[in-house]
Amino acid sequence: MIFNYDLLIKKIDETYKESKLEYKLVHFSKDVKIKIYRLKRILDSKAFFQNDEIMRIKDILNISKIEEYFFILKG
């Protein structure tokens, strides 16, 4: 399955203040306690988020509807 994480990436981009998305992803990965290489694999649909990771991300990014950010497949 290939998930669409476009909304999640957009939310990370809006939340973090670094100049480049790459730096924002590094900062975000530290905040949610996911290694950057694992986060990149997840965003490339080569790995999956675990439930506890989704809950930490939800809290850090202030996401109310997790299904919009984590469970939509690419068409």
Image (spheres, rainbow, N blue to C red):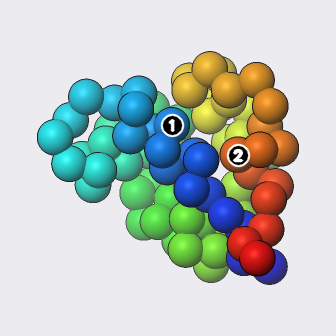
Res 54 visible: yes
| Disc 1 crowd, CA 10 A, few/some/many (<14, 14-19, 20+) | some
For this view, does 40 lie left or right of residue 42?
Answer: left
Say whether disc 1 or disc 2 marks the residue closer to the N-terminus. Answer: 1
Residue type at the position of mark 1:
Lys
Q: Residue at x 40, y 57 (%)?
A: 36
The quarter of the picture where residue 68 lies is: top right
The quarter of the picture where residue 29 lies is: top left
Q: Looking at the picture, how far across and down is residue 2, in whole percent?
A: 72, 76
Q: Which mark is residue 69?
A: 2
Q: Residue at x 59, y 47 (%)?
A: 7
Q: From this viewpoint, which residue is outermost toward the left?
A: 19
Q: Is residue 29 above or below residue 65?
A: below
| Disc 2 crowd, CA 10 A, few/some/many (<14, 14-19, 20+) | many
- Cα gap from disc 1 to disc 2, whole angstroms: 9 Å
Instruction: Choose between 48 and 12: the one closer to the eye.
Output: 12
Q: Looking at the picture, how far across and down is residue 11, in whole percent?
A: 51, 37
Q: Which mark is residue 60?
A: none
Q: Is residue 42 above or below residue 66?
A: below
Q: Residue at x 80, y 59 (%)?
A: 72
For this view, does 50 lie left or right of residue 46?
Answer: right
Res 26 visible: no
Q: Residue at x 74, y 51 (%)?
A: 70
For the C terminus, the image quarter is: bottom right
Q: Secondary structure at mark 1?
A: helix
For this view, does 11 lie left or right of residue 67?
Answer: left
Residue type at the position of mark 2:
Tyr
Q: Secondary structure at mark 2?
A: helix
Q: Are marks 1 and 2 in contact (CB under 8 Å)?
A: yes
Q: Looking at the picture, how far across and down is residue 1, in whole percent?
A: 80, 79
Give the residue pinned by disc 1: 11
The quarter of the picture where residue 17 lies is: top left
